[in-house]
């Protein structure tokens, strides 16, 4: 979904609570800014990697888990 659609559909505080329950801490400038970064606003990276791998554009060698994200 687009960022604008995410802002309309996702409540920032609810997203913060959901992520906190998964052990993910959030420090956001605004709740609308947080809402536009909701996981639902992004493609599933596993599916994207699989397509890239199958098309031969790249190849899978490791799966990484982020430890921090900084948006500026």
Image (cartoon, rainbow, N blue to C red):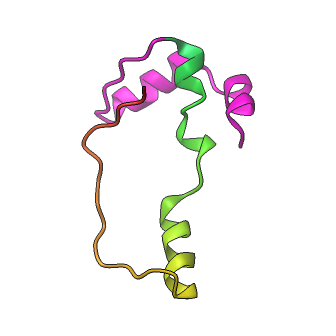
Front residue of this view, candidates 10 and 5: 5
User: Bounds of the magenta span?
Assistant: 1-29
Residue 64 picture location, percent across and down:
29, 60
Callout count:
0
Front residue of this view, candidates 62 and 23: 62
Q: Residue at x 45, y 80 (%)?
A: 58
In which quadrant is the C terminus drawn? top left
Magenta stretch containing residue 20, yes or no? yes
Residue 56 picture location, percent across and down:
52, 88
Which residue is most to the left? Answer: 67
Residue 49 picture location, percent across and down:
49, 71
Q: Quadrant of residue 61?
A: bottom left
Q: Say left or right for 55 vs 22.
A: right
Front residue of this view, candidates 72 and 13: 72
Q: Quadrant of residue 3?
A: top right
Q: Residue at x 53, y 41 (%)?
A: 39
Above or below, comparing residue 34 to residue 1 in the picture:
above
Q: Say left or right for 24 vs 5.
A: left
Q: Residue at x 42, y 17 (%)?
A: 28
Magenta stretch containing residue 28, yes or no? yes
Residue 4 picture location, percent across and down:
73, 29
In which quadrant is the N terminus drawn? top right
Above or below, comparing residue 29 to residue 21 in the picture:
above
Q: Say left or right for 36 vs 58.
A: right
Q: Residue at x 51, y 26 (%)?
A: 15
């Amino acid at each position: 979904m687009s960022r604008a659609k995410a802002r309309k559909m996702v409540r920032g505080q609810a997203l913060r609570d959901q992520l906190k329950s998964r052990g993910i801490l959030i420090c956001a400038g605004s709740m609308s800014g947080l809402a536009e970064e909701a996981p639902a606003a992004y493609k599933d990276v596993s599916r994207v990697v699989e397509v890239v791998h199958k098309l031969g554009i790249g190849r899978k060698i490791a799966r990484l888990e982020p430890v921090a994200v900084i948006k500026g």
